[in-house]
């Protein structure tokens, strides 16, 4: 059996350290600030994005890698005969997967999976793929398991500021909030690859996040699969981040709680003080 490489784009938000630990390859996406383009997590970090927005009042934009970029990337990964399972950002949110599919057409051994998700909603599938690879599963088996799991990924997050999502246009439902734009802390949910507005919260972010976590994880019939959960956030105080982590741990639902900071792609669209709890349901 040929070697299997697990791959994703930088929107999976598992971070450099975890990617290296689990032997996952990451192709960074592009972040554009003004007239200049940067490589997510390489030449631009979230702090650079906040600085740019603070100084200019202009939101950054994100872009997919080109077909040529994907071709070069996949050819390098498969040069020794390896197969690649690449888990991509949702086709409903970006042309990233379209470019990956086109690039893979003439490169044997490259398998593309549409996560129908973003951030660590992708990351959950990436780590599942790494688990399956380490168990000795074939690329086809990994792809089949991932495709069957995609509908069971629970991905949601609460945003403090709606201006990033509103101006970025990635969540059309945000515009319906109208005059309440700056007063609400909505839960943004990912369903079938698209973002929509769920429950709307008010109050301090500490209380809002406590209520969000309680609503999400204390559902009477909730059953989780895999026992792994991501707590993923943009720039946030350590105290609030750790408070949310403890709330999740107290539920006893998960054996592995992974706390990650979102990269440039999610930061560009959600802004600071955004936090999500993402896991796989049975």
Image: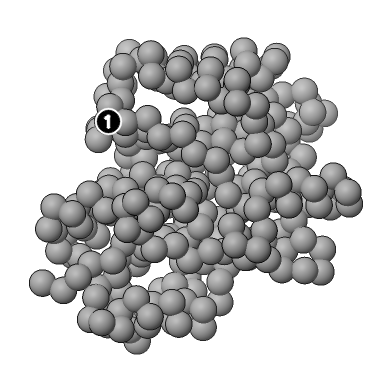
Query: Is 257 left, or right, of 212 in this rendering?
Result: left
Res. 162 image quadrant: top right
Q: Quick check: can you spot residue 233?
A: yes
Q: In this view, does 188 lie above or below 29?
A: above
Tell me the quarter of the image containing the N terminus. bottom left
| Residue toward you, 183 or 1 | 1
158 on left or right of 129:
right
Which element carries disc 1, helix, strand or loop? strand
In depth, the one of 260 and 156 nearer the eye is: 260
Residue furthest out toward the bottom? 106
Give me the residue at 57% from left, 67% from top: 64
Q: In which quarter of the image is residue 208?
A: top right
Local crowd size for mark 1, using a 10 Å CA cut-off: few (<14), some (14–19), many (≥20):
some
Give the residue at x 13% y 58%: 137
Residue 23 placement (x, y as % from top left) = 32, 58
Residue 159 visible: no
Q: Where is residue 186 in the image (x, y as percent from the top left)?
A: 63, 28
Judged left or right of residue 15, residue 40 is right
Q: Where is residue 206 in the image (x, y as percent from the top left)?
A: 63, 16
Q: Is residue 189 above or below residue 113?
A: above
Q: Which of 213 and 16 is in front in this view?
A: 16
Instruction: Indicate left or right for 127 with 194 as reference.
Output: left
Q: Residue 35 is drawn in which quadrant?
A: bottom right
Residue that mark 1 sits on: 227
Residue at x 28%, y 66% (from the top left corner): 5
| Residue ID at (62%, 65%) | 39
**Furthest residue to the right?**
56
Image x and y of residue 145, in percent: 21, 52
Q: Specify the quadrant that holds the C terminus.
A: top left
Query: Please, is residue 262 above or below residue 255 in the view?
Result: below
């Amino acid at each position: 059996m040929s070697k299997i490489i697990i791959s994703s784009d930088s929107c999976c938000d598992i971070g450099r350290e975890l990617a290296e630990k689990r032997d996952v390859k990451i192709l960074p996406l592009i972040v554009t600030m003004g007239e200049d383009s940067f490589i997510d997590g390489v030449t631009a970090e979230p702090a650079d994005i906040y600085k740019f927005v603070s100084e200019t009042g202009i939101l950054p934009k994100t872009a997919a890698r080109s077909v040529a970029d994907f071709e070069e990337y996949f050819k390098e990964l498969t040069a020794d005969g390896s197969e690649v399972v690449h888990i991509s950002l949702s086709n409903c949110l970006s042309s990233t997967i379209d470019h990956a599919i086109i690039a893979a057409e003439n490169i044997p051994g490259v398998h593309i999976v549409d996560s129908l998700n973003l951030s660590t909603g992708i990351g959950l599938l990436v780590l599942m793929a790494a688990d399956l690879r380490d168990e000795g599963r074939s690329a086809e088996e990994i792809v089949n398991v991932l495709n069957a799991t995609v509908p069971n990924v629970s991905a949601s997050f609460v945003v403090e500021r709606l201006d990033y999502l509103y101006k970025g246009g990635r969540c059309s439902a945000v515009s319906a909030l109208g005059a309440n734009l700056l007063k609400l802390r909505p839960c943004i949910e990912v369903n079938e690859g698209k973002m929509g507005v769920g429950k709307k919260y008010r109050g301090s972010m500490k209380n809002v996040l406590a209520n969000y976590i309680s609503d999400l994880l204390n559902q009477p019939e909730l059953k989780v699969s895999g026992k792994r959960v991501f707590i993923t956030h943009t720039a946030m105080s350590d105290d609030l981040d750790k408070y949310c982590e403890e709330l999740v741990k107290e539920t006893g639902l998960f054996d592995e709680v992974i706390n990650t900071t979102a990269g440039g792609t999610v930061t560009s669209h959600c802004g600071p003080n955004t936090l999500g709890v993402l896991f796989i349901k049975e």
